[in-house]
Image (spheres, rainbow, N blue to C red):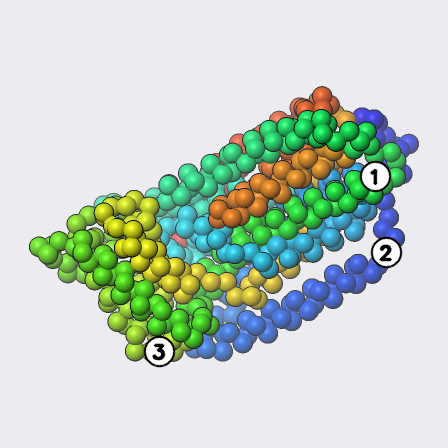
Amino acid sequence: MTVSNATDAGLRAEHPLDKPSSLGQWPNYAVVAILLAGLVYVGYSLTNELTSSVAVPWILLGLALLIALGFEFVNGFHDTANAVATVIYTNSLPAELAVIWSGFFNFLGVMTASGAVAFGIISLLPVELIMQVGSSAGLAMVFSLLIAAILWNLGTWYLGIPSSSSHTLVGSIVGVGLANQFLAPAGTVTSGVDWSKATEVGMSLLISPLVGFGVAALLLLVMKVLVKSKALYEAPKGNTPPPLWIRALLIFTCTGVSFAHGSNDGQKGMGLIMLILIGVVPTAFALNRTPDVNYLEAYKAASTAASTALHKYAKPEIAVTDAREVVNNAVRTKTWSDEMSAALPRFIDETSASISPYGSAANVPNGMVSNTRNDMYLIGEALKLVEKQKPLPLQDAEMTAVKSYHKAIDNATKFIPTWVKVAVALALGLGTMVGWKRIVVTVGEKIGKTHLTYGQGASAELVAMGTIFTADSLGLPVSTTHILSSGVAGTMVANGSGLQMSTVRNLAMAWILTLPVSIALSFTLFLILRHLI
């Protein structure tokens, strides 16, 4: 049965999007209850954490958080729709129940996320803007990249074209970095785009759709050899659900993709929200105020060990007047020098000495929090150069000391409160349940020339789930949209079903245009906001 036949008026009554749920309004009531409980928890937690702040710019904070959560909301109804297309079009779950099911597991994925992807995305941003995120330039950065990403996502969603939120966000970050360099006075040392990290992220976004296409096609062919059940390779008949074991398989893959999507994509919003909180209310969020009670002692021990290891490679004849400035310039330019070898251990000692008298991070005076956080973050970026570029002939024990200290810094400066995870999870889950239909129709009806079979749906989602989980463990962002839609296309080719080339062209154009358009949007918005803020 072809897609065009499936959508004829005479068969419209059997269309999977029109299949009613037998649960009535109860799922909707449950969603409303979860949303209300989540909002109460987020509001209480935020208010409680802000009690330590001297002054809170509530309007600015509210606007910034609203835009950040808006990005995740759009991400939810744009990207997560891919996860439910297969279970809806194979009649494994009614559309309404499938969307709620996917939203719930997106929520769980966000809540269990490690944070590695969140701070991997943030590391693409210019270092000085991260360190001064509360300044006008820092706020312009956050607003520009978020608004640019939302605009492109909304545009592609309106046209029903699956596009990648990850791709869009990376492009927006690159645009801000380029604009930051463009506005810098001639001859100044200004950081723009971390091209090494951008290349790493770009490669993951480039390769993952190819993996989705090729591996899903191969998996379907292998399944046909190993699993001889004829029912697995048939298209659904009317509104009849598939056999129980096939239905269980498809619900499992939908669950896995939804959970993986929440775990990976949800982290992008977390990282941006933390940037906003650090910039707008640094006294509450610049440093992790709730680590282990013995954290500061462990931090000082790690600091001493790393400093001792690095001091060995400082040349005595090199004089350093301002250690912080030397480290700052080295991090901005990603270059090492003999002066840096002398400055870094000295800067580590100075930073450790400044917080030693306070016993714990919670006791650091409000007036010192921002500077302390920036100093620690700067050291962390410098240690990243030591680990990646290996400019010093460190022995194994010395490199271990450096990595241990780097981890201690990350524990203090790169953290995500539980309420932030809940807020992102709610936005992502709610988005999933609101605007899913346009993208679902594209994935379910407009990629292949024939109806999606059970085996095709399972193959595409198994590959998507595995690819996203792998990227998550590596701290890399990937596109759920690109992986799953290319996986569906791969199974159509492997099945000999053929592709609807108009949709393939639209997908390819969205993939090609996302980076340049999002770069241009965020570049332009940053220039405008720098003059307005």
Q: Secondary structure at mark 2?
A: loop
* Circles 1, 2 touching at the beta carbon (< 8 Å): no
Residue 445, quarter of the rendered image: top right
C-alpha separation, residue under disc 1 versus residue under disc 2: 20 Å
Q: Is residue 533 above or below residue 10?
A: below
Residue behind mark 2: 23
Residue behind mark 3: 359
Q: Is residue 330 left or right of residue 413?
A: left
Q: Is residue 367 above or below residue 14?
A: below
Amino acid tagged 1: Pro
C-alpha separation, residue under disc 3 versus residue under disc 2: 56 Å
Q: Nearer the viewer, residue 489 or 215?
A: 215
Q: Is residue 293 above or below residue 113?
A: below
Q: Nearer the viewer, residue 108 or 374?
A: 108
Residue behind mark 1: 242
Q: Secondary structure at mark 1?
A: loop
Instruction: Name the spot of residue 376 as percent of width and height, x first.
Output: 33, 63
Amino acid tagged 3: Gly
